[in-house]
Amino acid sequence: MISRNACAISTARSSPLSTHTTIRIGGPAEVLAFPRDADEVALLVRDCAERGVPWRVLGRGSNLLVADAGVPGVTIHTRDLRSIRFGDGGLVVAGAGLRTSTLHAEAMKRGLGGLECVVGYPATVGGSARMNAGGRWGETGARIEWVAAVDATGEVRTLPRDACNFGYRTSALAGLAVVEVAFRLPEVDLPAYRAAIDAIHAEKSRAQPLAEPSAGCMFRNPPGNSAGRLVDACGLKGRAVGGAMVSTVHGNFVVNRGGATCDDVLRLVDAVRDEVRRRTGVELETEVEVWGAEHVPAHG
Ligand code: EPU
């Protein structure tokens, strides 16, 4: 599966991904690799490209649904890419696997802020950049100066902000393995900033099921509308299939109330989409990335 060179990299075989996703669902990764730096990521990707082996990147698995049957090939886990260094003028360069909450805490220690957008997200720096994570309090991409990523040929490239094409939960980083992200953060008045962060946290804890296993928002908001509000208005909160349930707190979250399978979630997603289409005419699109089960099964 991987060459002798790449074998120096820490790997596990048939490792269940349910322990690596926030919704606690997912079958085994054929190979789960833990590279320690950009060169090891590049080596893995080149190796896969040469052998025609599929590869993908896993951060905290917070926006991700993995098929019960698992995924073939190499899953590159960014766990060990946790570097962080500070430069002049609010520059912070963070490894893809660093948690955004750690980045935020370290930035605040140096009087830097501007990361309201990541409060309440359990994601990594790489995943937040890739998805341009955010919402009412801004988007991650707005604070990014450049991104270093390994492309499909195994070359490390530096993409300036403009080349990242940040959009609503999208970027040009799809299909690349992000290894480092440079942020430019503003100096803030810390007491006032901390108070604002606490208020955002309180609001999210009230409005979202942050303590329950979920993959974050399941659907993208349709233009000018809110997926959560639509699901709620259709009376679908609490609707369940197997162990998967539409959160009773926020209509755009599917929670794992114990023992849910990927298939349960996909069937529930399909049922919710059908009902919202039937009642409102709006077609909901999933925001969560799905690995190994690209086709949502027919309801029933
Ligand atoms: N609403 C309801 N019922 C519900 C849920 C929401 O009526 O069950 C209403 C709310 O009262 C509010 C409106 O719908 O008037 C919008 O809801 P909310 O403020 O919770 O924001 P959202 O559009 O549902 C977006 C992001 C979230 C992000 C929040 C807050 C998307 C798909 N979601 O949610 O991001 O945390 O704003 O900034 O863009 C995620 O990306 O995984 C995610 C959770």
Image (cartoon, helix red, strand yellow):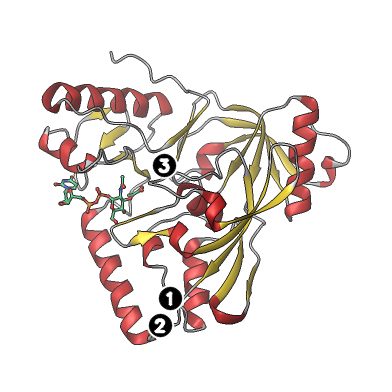
Residue sitting at x 20%, y 48%: 249
For the question of whether residue 237 can be seen, the reply is: no
Instruction: Give the x, y percent position of residue 188.
Output: 40, 82
For disc 2, the neighbor class at 10 Å (few under 14, some 14 to 19, many from 20) is: some
For disc 1, the neighbor class at 10 Å (few under 14, some 14 to 19, many from 20) is: many
* Quadrant showing the N terminus: top right
Along the viewing direction, whichever of 76 and 43 lies nearer the viewer: 43
Residue sitting at x 73%, y 50%: 156
The local secondary structure at tag 2 comes to loop
Direction from residue 182 to residue 186 in the image, left or right: left
Name the amino acid, label 3: Ile
Name the amino acid, label 1: Gly
Name the amino acid, label 2: Val
Location of mark 2 (residue): 188
The reply to whether dot 2 and dot 1 touch (C-beta < 8 Å) is yes
Location of mark 1 (residue): 113
Location of mark 3 (residue): 23
Instruction: Give the x, y percent position of residue 97.
Output: 59, 56
Along the viewing direction, whichever of 288 and 27 lies nearer the viewer: 288
